[in-house]
Amino acid sequence: MFDVILYQPEIPPNTGNIIRLCANTGVRLHLVKPLGFSLDDRQVRRAGLDYHEYATVQVYDNWPDCAAHFHDRRVFAVSTKGAQRYDGNRYRAGDAFLFGPETRGLPAELLSTYADERRIRLPMLPDSRSLNLSNAVAVVVYEALRQADFGGCV
């Protein structure tokens, strides 16, 4: 129903947690290289437990290949520099959510390719840096699912 894109993720347990989230919600996961780890990494497997086989995960060699896959879809870039709150949009099946690497976020040149209404953020206290990646993904995914009446989840 929805897709999550991790652009150059760096921390294995975060990706493992997101794999587990995707497996339990039916959300498809897309990973854009370079990855800061191997998908066989013990920490990825530990965090994802045995859910990896239940998740749909696609890996792309670079951003242009991934972007081409979503050329006809709505993609929302999630960033602390987002123009509007994540709950300010009406999401629909087929939408995708793009998240940047943990230590640096989405590059400015990539973020700037998205219109204001497609650059979303999670509210935080002033002067806060960012939320944990897997937590941020969970918040956004569950808002999209809530708007879709949880799309078959019980």
Image: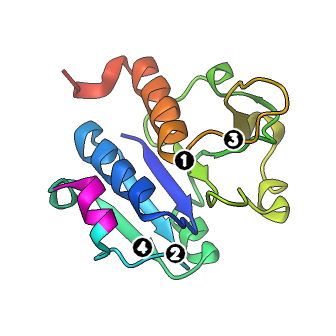
Instruction: Say whether marks 4 and 2 touch (CB < 8 Å).
Output: no
The disc at residue 130 is: 3
Q: Position of residue 118 (x, y in %)?
A: 72, 40
Q: Magenta part of the protein: which range?
A: 43-49
Give the residue number, with chain letter if any, for mark 2: 36
- Magenta stretch: helix, strand or loop mostly: helix
Q: CA distance from mark 4 to mark 1?
A: 18 Å
Looking at the picture, tell me which residue is in the foreground, 131 or 82: 131
Question: The residue tagged with tag 4: helix, strand or loop?
Answer: strand
Q: Residue at x 30, y 26 (%)?
A: 151
User: Looking at the image, can residue 7 be seen?
Assistant: yes
Per the image, the residue denoted by label 1 is 133
- Observer-side mark, 4 or 1, equals 1
Mark 1 neighbour density, 10 Å: few (under 14) some (14–19) many (20 or more) = many
Looking at the image, tell me whether mark 4 or mark 2 is earlier in sequence order: 2
How far apart, in angstroms, are the residues tagged by discs 4 and 2?
Answer: 13 Å
Query: Between marks 3 and 1, how big is the CA–CA gap?
Result: 8 Å
Q: Amino acid at mark 1?
A: Leu
Can you tell which mark lies on residue 59?
4
